[in-house]
Amino acid sequence: MMKRNGIAFWIGAAVFLGAAFVMTKVVANQYPFFAGYVILQFIALAVAWSILGGYAGYVNFGTSAFYGVGVYTSVFLVQAFGAPLLVQIATAAAIGALMGFALGLLTLRMQGIFFSIATIALTIIIETAVTNWRFVGGAAGIQIQRPPVTPPFDNYVQMLFFIQALLVVLAVAISRYIQNSWIGRGLQALRDDELAAECSGVPTLRLKLLACVISGALLCAIGAPAAMYLQYADPASAFNLNYSVSTLAMSLIGGTAHWSGPIIGAILLSTTQQLLTVTISSEVNVLVLGVMLVLFVVGAPEGIMGLISRLRRSRKEGEA
Amino acid sequence: MDLLLDAVVIGVLLGCFYGAVSLGLSVSFGLLDVPHVAHPAFLVLASYMVYFLNEHYAIDPLVAGLLITPLLFVFGLAAYRLYYETFERRGSDAGVRGIAFFFGVAFIIEVLIILQFGVDQRSVTADYVGKALRLGELRIPYRLLVAFAVAAALTILLTLYLSRTFMGRAIRAVAQDQEALRLMGTNPIRIKQWAFGIATAVLGVAGALLIIVAPVDPTLDRAYIGRTFCVVVMAGLGSMSGTLVAAIILGVAESIVLTMFGASWAPAISFAMLLGVLAVRPQGLFGRR
């Protein structure tokens, strides 16, 4: 059963990547890639966030911190060395892992809402430091020259689109692996009751550090290509709190108990937002985010996945 | 040296003002354990109400703040009801989902303000806005003095209310042991709801001070998440006099950094202090735990 699921998953992933690649060859209009990149980015962010926020139950409001550091790692590498995209992403992942480790150490002293507030604090502190860093443009932001595009792609945005699709697959594969392994079960145990888990021999600290490092590395890596996507970066938007709240909202809306929940939530929310940004305005975007977040947290605390499983259960009970 | 003295004086005044805007959170988060990250958004909303009354009916901002107080009180009662019914009663995960809920509420308020008033900065007009008192070399804006006096009065009033009146003592009792109150035959939820109403009502005058001290814009609440939570956590949850002391420490620190390193470092001060307090002394300076 497990085996067949695994094969189906990898076939699905291959089909998805194949479709994304064919799209870059067939579709001439640039807009789908611009919009698609943003949607893919949010899917990846939500999945990566859930590794710590969903499985372990440590609600990280510092998504913007990791994302922004990813963006500025790219900015720095391009400014200083003209580094290619893959180097940017790999470096961002390494820095994100270090940041994640630091965040993991914070969990030693803080839990619940205090942990969440501390992650917001971290975001603002890093943002302020970047704002005062002249080399990467300071508060005014910075224009970035894209390095030449690498074959087989003939357009930079299309390449970014495909790379973000790769990151989505990577994030989902890792998240799925964690959920099905001892790591996921351990995280779930510490989420339900950290003290009880520790007492029954679950290595809580090691698991928390692991979740923080993996989640952090992914979040940073996902942010890295954004600098090349916009060809511009400024601290106020790279570290915008909207990334944190959007990511959290997408995961909660989808449901965090299963790896597919954040994907569903991210597709739903970011597609709605993309449509609204085009048709109405970006302010309404934030309004939709707020309203959906409140509605789901109040009405469907387990998210869409929770609704589905509740529906299934009641149907089963009806049959029996 | 003069510059430093200047910074300290301004910092103390600014700190009292920070105390006033944090008082409500000190009750809602400090005493009631509600993860109220929308507190600063409520504050900015109150400022815009004051702005509206001042702009259209030429009412003094402080009077306007008092006028909207009953409205905010009722708003607070309703908000707590909703929070209680959806989170506290269900029990599990109230903190985590609660903070997500309040972030959603904060974003909704932000956008509603933008849709109604636009993204521009708004300020009020009054006799004491824009002039300054000269004491030798020292130049103190009147608006800061007004904020200082009102903030001090507000803190004293709320402290007296919580320690001298029956309802105030009940609020502190519910913060200490909710079950004990239930055993005594009172309804702790009613008391908490009342307390949350008070915490929100205080924002009327606090919002007036906010727009007196400086112009406001719809996303100002994000900066005040750091300041208010820093003050409340540093004070030790639920300590009113501690709130004032912690706020003055923050005000002086911000003011000194502002003078020494420039305004671009200011946003990080409150968050850095918050992080420091959380890491080193989570129970705060005057903590009850």
Image (cartoon, coloured by chain):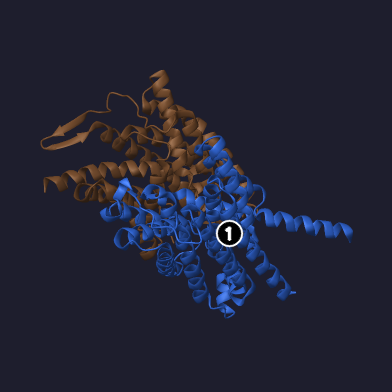
**Amino acid type of the residue that numbered disc 1 sits on in the rendered structure:** Phe
* Residue for point 84% across, 59% down: A317
Q: Is residue A271 above or below residue A313?
A: above
Crowding at dot 1, Cα within 10 Å, few <14 / some 14-19 / many 20+, comes out as: some
**Left or right: B209 with respect to A165?**
left
Residue situated in front as seen by the camera: B18 or A175: A175
Q: Is residue A53 visible?
A: no
Chain letter, brown in picture: B
The residue sitting at 41% across, 61% down in the picture is B283
Q: Which residue is mark 1?
A: A21
Query: Can residue A200 be seen by looking at this rendering?
Result: yes
Residue at point 44%, 62% (across, down) = B289
Please report, as a chain letter, where disc 1 is located: A
Return the residue nearer the eye: A12 or B42: A12
Task: From this view, report whether residue A89 is shown above or below residue B139.
Answer: below
Q: Quadrant of residue B65?
A: top left
Q: For the view shown, which residue lies furthest in the top direction?
A: B57
Left/right of residue B248 with respect to residue B76 in the rendered view: left
Q: Position of residue B155 (x, y in %)?
A: 37, 42
Quadrant of the rendering where the C terminus of chain A is positioned: bottom right
At which x and y percent is residue B80?
57, 43
Q: Position of residue A265 (x, y in %)?
A: 62, 53
Query: Is B245 in front, or is B188?
Result: B245
Q: Residue B114: horizontal and vertical position, in percent?
A: 47, 33
Q: Colour of chain A?
A: blue
